[in-house]
Amino acid sequence: MRKSFSPEFMGKVALAALKEEMTIAELSSKYEVHKAQIGRWRKQAMEELVGIFKGKGDNSKRDNEKLVNELYCQIGQLRVENEWLKKNLLLEH
């Protein structure tokens, strides 16, 4: 059966791993968590910390997604207008 850990607990263990005051093996024994799991939490914490200091990383991604969606909508509208113009110009000739 898998253990589930609270975010607070995972953060506590990851922070202890980042401090490097104890080895991963010692932390594993102390917190009763597998060494590989502590390594994953430590890596995830490092990635999240880097993201915090990048600042606009998440915002620019959301902004880009919003822009892409707006452009797809505009392309759809232009296609409809183009088809309408083709049909109406053919009727005039």
Image: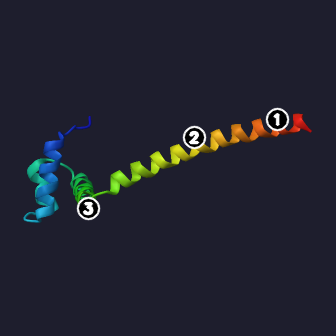
Label 3 Cα crowd, 10 Å radius (few <14 / some 14-19 / many 20+): few
> Disc number at residue 73?
2
Residue 75 image offset from top left, x and y in percent:
63, 44
Query: Disc 3 designates what residue?
Result: 50
Q: Nearer the viewer, mark 2 or mark 3?
A: 2
Compared with residue 88, is residue 58 higher up or lower down, i.e. above or below?
A: below
Residue 8 image offset from top left, x and y in percent:
14, 43
- Give me the C-alpha separation between circle 1 and circle 2: 23 Å
Question: Residue 21's image quarter?
Answer: bottom left
Residue 76 image offset from top left, x and y in percent:
64, 40
Give the residue drawn at x 66%, y 43%: 78
Residue 81 appears in view: yes
Query: Disc 1 designates what residue?
Result: 88
Answer with left or right where residue 44 lies relative to residue 17.
Answer: right
Q: Does the residue at mark 1 contact the one at mark 2 (Cβ under 8 Å)? A: no
Task: Compare residues 9 and 89 and report the one nearer the observer.
Answer: 89
* Quarter of the image that includes the N terminus: top left
Q: Does the residue at mark 3 contact the one at mark 1 (Cβ under 8 Å)? A: no
* Residue furthest right as drawn: 93
Question: Residue 49's image quarter?
Answer: bottom left
Inspect the image, locate mark 3, and give the three-letter code of the amino acid beneath it: Val
* Quarter of the image that includes the C terminus: top right
Give the residue drawn at x 28%, y 62%: 54
Inspect the image, locate mark 1, and give the three-letter code of the amino acid beneath it: Asn
Question: Residue 56's image quarter?
Answer: bottom left
Name the secondary structure under disc 3: helix
Task: Compare residues 38 and 61 and report the one nearer the observer.
Answer: 61
Q: Earlier in the sequence, mark 3 or mark 1?
A: 3
